[in-house]
Amino acid sequence: MFVGKWKERRPKSLLLFPTVRSESGKGGAIEPRSFRLQFARYVEAAGLPGWATPHVVRHSYATNFLNGGGNIRTLQIILGHSSLATTEKYLHVTDKDVAVAMRGY
């Protein structure tokens, strides 16, 4: 939900959160403080709730990636985690997941 709304509003760039200005016109890397300030403006402009933070977006992305069949090791690389144990925090096993996994047994 959040990532989809963000993609509709962000400047066109290969970076997920680019600067608005750059020589190429595509946006460059952004400083952490600038990121937090811009993120808050984009959250407001997109009409997202106030609790939408960079951490929530990161967590939502990771959860959606895994729910969509993404590999935990690939997610580890995407998120920049040095330990797989850190990435495993994004694994959520629900009753529905167990029921789906047990079909046919």
Image: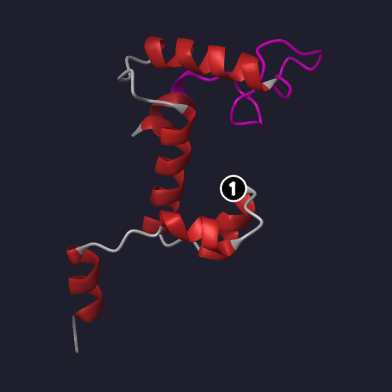
Where residue 94 sits: x, y (%)? 23, 62
The one of 35 and 83 positioned closer to us in this rendering: 83
Where residue 80 sits: x, y (%)? 65, 49
Above or below, comparing residue 66 to residue 19 in the picture: below
Direction from residue 68 to residue 104 in the image, left or right: left
Residue visible at 21% across and 80% down in the picture: 102
Could you tell me which quadrant the N terminus lies in? top left
Which segment is the magenta one? Answer: 8-30
Residue visible at 71% across and 10% down in the picture: 21
Residue visible at 45% across and 25% down in the picture: 6
Could you tell me which quadrant the C terminus lies in? bottom left
Where residue 74 sits: x, y (%)? 59, 60
Q: Amino acid at mark 1?
A: Leu
Q: Is residue 12 magenta?
A: yes
Quadrant position of residue 47: top left
The one of 50 and 10 positioned closer to us in this rendering: 50
Q: What SS does tag 1 mark?
A: helix
Q: Is residue 57 magenta?
A: no
Judging by the rendered image, the residue that carries numbered circle 1 is: 79
Direction from residue 74 to residue 48 in the image, left or right: left
Q: Main secondary structure of the magenta part?
A: loop
Above or below, comparing residue 75 to residue 101 in the picture: above
Give the class, few, some or many, for how many residues have Cα within 10 Å of label 1's Cα (few <14, many ≥20): some
Where residue 15 sits: x, y (%)? 65, 31
